[in-house]
Amino acid sequence: MLSRVAASFYWLSRYIERSDGILRMLKTNYASSQDAIQGFTWEPVIRIFSGSDQDLIDRLKNDSRTVINYMVTDKNNSNSVLSIITLSRENARGVQEHINTDLWQCLNEYYHIVKENSLVNKLKKDDPISALDILIKQVMLYYGTAEVTMERGPGRSFMNIGKYLERAIQAIDILDIKFGSINHNPDLLTDTTYWKHLLQSLGGYELYLKTYRDGLEAHNVLEQVILNNDFPRSVIYSVNNIQRYFDRLKLDSSMTDYQELSFFIGKLQSHIKYSSVKGIQNDGLHLYLTQLKDQLYQIGNLLNERYFANS
Amino acid sequence: MYKAAHFDGYHSIPGVWDEMYLQSSDIRAHYQKVIDYLSQESPDELGKKEELAQRLFMKQGITFTVYNSGEGIEKIFPFDIIPRIITGSEWDFVEKGIKQRLTALNLFLKDIYHNQFIIKDGIIPIDAIYSCPHFTREMYQVDVPYDIYVHIAGIDLIRDEEGTFYVLEDNLRTPSGVSYMLENREITKRLFPDLLPNCGVRSVTEYPNILYKNLQSLSPRRISNPTIVLLSPGIYNSAYFEHTTLARLMGVELVEGRDLVVNNQKVYMKTTTGLQQVDVIYRRVDDEYLDPLVFNPNSILGVAGIMGAYRKGNVAIVNAIGNGVADDKAIYIYVPDMIKYYLNEEPILKNVPTYRLNNPDEQKYVFDNINKMVVKKTNGSGGYGMLMGHAASQEEIDEYKLEILKQPRDFIAQPTISLSAAPCYIQGALRPRRIDLRPYALCGPDGIEIVPGGLTRVALKEGSLVVNSSQGGGSKDTWVLA
């Protein structure tokens, strides 16, 4: 497979996953802003997806509509859904003859919907949740179409590696910022809906209720989001899948490249697998999360260098 | 006459060959079945078909992107639903003519880059060749596989008021539009069920297979499965859709310049398993951008060193480099002489009379009769930089004359040919619009093959004679009857 094609697969998929994360995050936070008695702040959301430019945060943090518009349809925000779907679609165009027509048309449609005026109006004036739902549905449609139509070859492996890498990084960012904004001291928190929203934005609230019977506790949240093998948005689940799809690339790799990356992914996998919530908390959550993120970035860099010929 | 409302008010343009009507307003026999079919449909029904066609094009992404203020706008190449029909005997004539012409042009390119007998024998003056910007000195004494330079040609044909076919230009570099020939046919199948087989229309679907077979035969390495790639300038190119379509239909890899690298005078593509040698390149990148070491040094679309690999014979490039010397509009004048010189035959297809503006007598004649002339740049394309004498204002003409006087070699003039007209479905009714025809000829070691069909371009604006898509032109499905 051409290196450029592999890179396009990887990035088109990373961007889709990111758009999914943004949309779900906006939806839950908007809903909770409607619950809030005191002033609701968007600061953590902005920090997760748009960096920590304090001016920007101050300008946006108290106005739900402005935040949502900035993060969905703003052309000047390089990480808005519109911007990243445009990039995703361009990557797809570059590999158009490698993906199925259905998948291309699905992405093409997603792009045209984000650009529609009626969507912009809904976000500005009507119920933003119904507009966000339309877009979330497009992502689901994309995942279904990819699952059913993509040839089981290296292209799909690169797509999935991109998807799970992005997903793992998002889960880590969300934890880091959410715990960071309460100074890593959950005992001070009186309102447990804080955890409920965190879990909802990852689609893991219902699973939590089924797993833990003793209410919303910070250490249980950590356990589920980092260590639960069966939670499709947990860090360990994502890393397991990176390992799984990377392994399938063995025949499409040069041996030294394969071994080096394989070693690295395996090391990260074991690092997480043999962690415990207690241990993590003793060592410091922020430090632990930072280490994981560094290692994920390093995997990204190695792919870039060894597989995408961008050294 | 026919009852259906969309036939009302169809009047052939006086003094113009109408593909559908005879002078006496009878219908030509080969259009009969289509007309019978159309007259059973209401104008509404046809309107719906037109909408369906547009939806199909948009949905499949058969679009080109116009970049405007940082934002891409998707446009479809306008498509007219009424097919253009060519009879079997007309086609036989056209086919013979193109084969003859292409044979001579290939011989000319071989000659001009080797012994130059045609100059030595005084058929073409030496300055006509050496003043051509596309005469590529780097190709001198380079041998190409099977002596084929033009593997793919798109020869533009037009018909005058008598219905005689003329060659308007030879496109021998990277002719485009063939994907529209294929897609237009697919759309017509959806629009008019059963009509194609009932009329006995010959199929065009073989095109990608023939092209693939030819590309495969050019591989310098004698191996069973050579690596063939299609080199595209990338997704921002307006013909990108065509590149992906052809790559998909042939099952070859679509690459960009940055995917290729030259080492030890061999071309490789960068893959996830390492470098893989490339044998044949069907390039859709112009000569000028192909190799920054030899041609335009600022090009990032090409591959550094590819010309060296090509000269060494380690990679085949399709079409050959330097073909521009044969489709230059100032060399066009000599094509009938080439046919006589190389083949000892009379040209089957006629040239449009052409005046060189660097010849003082011809220049004077053109300036005196400029209202009846079309003036073109010798290396222009896409309908840009043309002067249509009958439609231009005195001011435009004066300005253009100044341009000509600066660089007379760069211009030629031709009398305005009244292109033939065919019925088009325009706002609920059939109206005559001017058309041309571009068949695609494929030249391989086994000879020249032309799939029966081509791209019919149509000037959708009333009264317009310019069919280029950049100037408000569209296209039609082109039927050749068995």
Image (cartoon, coloured by chain):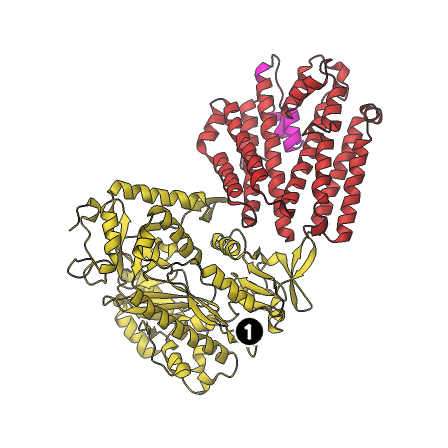
Residue B231 seen by the camera: yes
Q: Could you say which is closer to the camera, residue B44 or residue A62?
A: B44
Vertical position of residue A259 compared to residue B138: above or below: above
Look at the image and give the residue range highlighted in magenta.
A34-63
Q: Position of residue A50 (x, y in %)?
A: 63, 33
- Whether residue B86 sits left or right of residue B230 in the image: it is left
Determine which residue is flagged by label 1. B145
The numbered mark 1 sits on a residue in which chain? B
Quarter of the figure with residue A274: top right
Left or right: where does residue A192 sit relative to residue B184? right
Letter of the chain in red: A
Residue type pointed to by label 1: Pro
Secondary element at image label 1: helix
Q: Nearer the viewer, residue B91 or A29?
A: B91
- B99, above or below A55, in the image: below
Could you say where residue B44 lies in the image, as x and y percent from the top left? 26, 40
Chain B representation colour: yellow
Query: Where residue B454 sits in the image (x, y, percent)?
Result: 38, 60
Residue B466 picture location, percent across and down: 32, 59
Q: Up-down: is A67 above or below B338? A: above
